[in-house]
Each structure stands twice: as C-alpha cells, then as structure tokens.
Image (cartoon, rainbow, N blue to C red):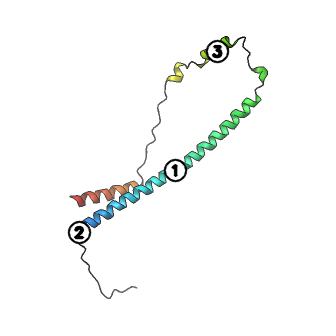
Amino acid sequence: MVTVKSQVHVNIPNSSEIRRDLLTSAVISLESLQYYENLKNLRQTKAIEISHFKSIMTEIYNLVKDVELNELPEYASKFHSNKIVKKMIKPSIQDTVKKPIKVIPVKKSQLESEIDDIRKKLGQLEI
C-alpha cells in the first residue's frame, strides 16, 4: 500500500490552452495511427492480389503454351487479316456497360469513436 505524505498543488497558467493543445495532438496522433493501420491493410490486400495475379498469369502462360501453331488460322493477305482483326476488336454493348461498384459499408472502429470523443471535448473547450 502506498501512502502519500504530502500533497503539492501547482497552478498552471492558461490551462485551457494547454488542454486544447494536448487534445489536438491526441487527435493528430490517433489519425496517424489510423492511417498506418489502413496502409498496413492495403499492403496485405496488395500482396494477396499480386499472388492471385501471378497464379492467373502462370495459368494463361500454360494455356498459351499448350496451343499449337497448327490450330491458329492463316490469312490470305495482310489487308484481309486487318479487316478481320478490326471487326473482332469492336466492343459489344455488354462490354461497354459498366457494372456497378460494390460499396462496402465501413464500421466505425474504436479508434474513430475515440477521435470523435476527443473532438467533442475540444469543441467544448473552444466555447
């Protein structure tokens, strides 16, 4: 058990300004921590997507390797082959229609709720 022999009280001038500065620095540090967490998650997602991309590319490489040159069509002239290629390149209506982007709802994390609480305290100090 700890016993306190004497208490010392110190007067801090401009305590509201010091408290405001402390709360502001707390908000900034929490936002930087939140940014770091988002960056870490992004790096993990990037690594997963890169490995997925590599597996797809190896599969494509293996499929192209399996295709024999005898199976590819031959064209009579350069002009004729350009016409066919241009016809094949035209996008269909289904390709031009963009699919809607899924919006993933973001749950408010504990860190964001702490930032909001600190901002409320900071707003009360400014009044």
The image's mark for residue 82 is 3
Residue at figure coordinates x 25%, y 65% from the top left: 17
Instruction: Give me the C-alpha separation between circle 2 and circle 1.
Output: 41 Å
In the rendered structure, which amino acid carries the disc numbered 3?
Asn
Disc sitting over residue 41 in the figure: 1
The secondary structure type at the circle numbered 1 is helix
- Residue at the left extreme of this rendering: 127
Give the alpha-carbon distance from disc 1 to disc 3, as whole Å: 46 Å
From the viewer's perspective, is residue 92 above or below residue 121? above
**Cβ atoms under marks 2 and 1 closer than 8 Å:** no
Using the rendered view, name the quadrant where residue 49 is placed. top right
What residue type is disc 1 on?
A: Asn
Mark nearer the viewer, 3 or 2? 3
Query: Where residue 30 appears, x then y in whole percent?
Result: 40, 58
* Residue ID at (60%, 45%): 48
Q: In the rendered image, which residue does mark 2 sit on?
A: 14
How many discs mark residues in the rendered view? 3
Residue 59, percent from left and from top: 70, 35
Say whether disc 1 or disc 3 marks the residue closer to the N-terminus.
1
CB under 8 Å between discs 1 and 3: no
Q: Kindly check if marks 3 and 2 are in contact, taking CB atoms under 8 A apart as contact.
A: no
Q: Amino acid at mark 2?
A: Asn
Is tag 2's residue or tag 1's residue first in the polypeptide sequence?
2
Q: Residue furthest front?
A: 78
